[in-house]
Amino acid sequence: MTDNMWGYPAASGHQAGSDLTGFKVEATDGQIGKVDKHSEDVGSAYIVVDTGMWIFGKHVLLPAGTISRIDPAEQRLYVDRTKDEIKASPEFDKDKHVGDTGYHQQVGTYYGSPRA
């Protein structure tokens, strides 16, 4: 089930209207990059992470449901996936990520349901 993958989990501490751009992103096994952009759109909320040199400048799309915690004081965002899971994710497509339900379904299926 991927429907709830595209919403910020209540336990993450996300505050509607907050700007996450520039926040450092931490996987379960270390830092993966910084938030390049994000969306709070109902049913399609996400973050785009600039991985920098970690995986050769790749950008990855992470559904908001992968976020486990946001720390505004430290400007860090924690996701409940490993570096390898994120590295192997479907390629970010800047032309398809907005409005392409098939692309969202592909990414949502890859990440599966949010983890408790």
Image: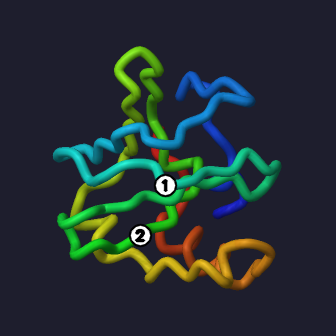
Give the residue at mark 1.
36
Query: Residue visible at 61% across and 54% down?
Result: 46
**At which x and y percent is residue 18?**
65, 29
Give the residue at mark 2.
59
Residue 33 higher or lower than 16, as above or below:
below
For the residue labelled by badge 1, is the local secondary structure a helix, a strand or a loop? strand
Query: Residue visible at 59% across and 68% down?
Result: 108
Residue count near mark 2 (Cα–Cα under 10 Å), binned few <14, some 14–19, many ≥20: many
Tell me which amino acid carries mark 2.
His
Q: Is residue 101 left or right of residue 76?
A: right
Report if the CB atoms under discs 2 and 1 are less than 8 Å apart.
yes
For the residue labelled by badge 2, is the local secondary structure a helix, a strand or a loop? strand
Q: Earlier in the sequence, mark 2 or mark 1?
A: 1
Quarter of the view holding residue 84: bottom left
**At which x and y percent is residue 6?**
67, 54
Residue 24, labelled with which disc? none
Spatial separation of the CA atoms under disc 2 and disc 1: 8 Å
Q: Quadrant of the N terminus?
A: bottom right
Quarter of the view holding residue 3: bottom right
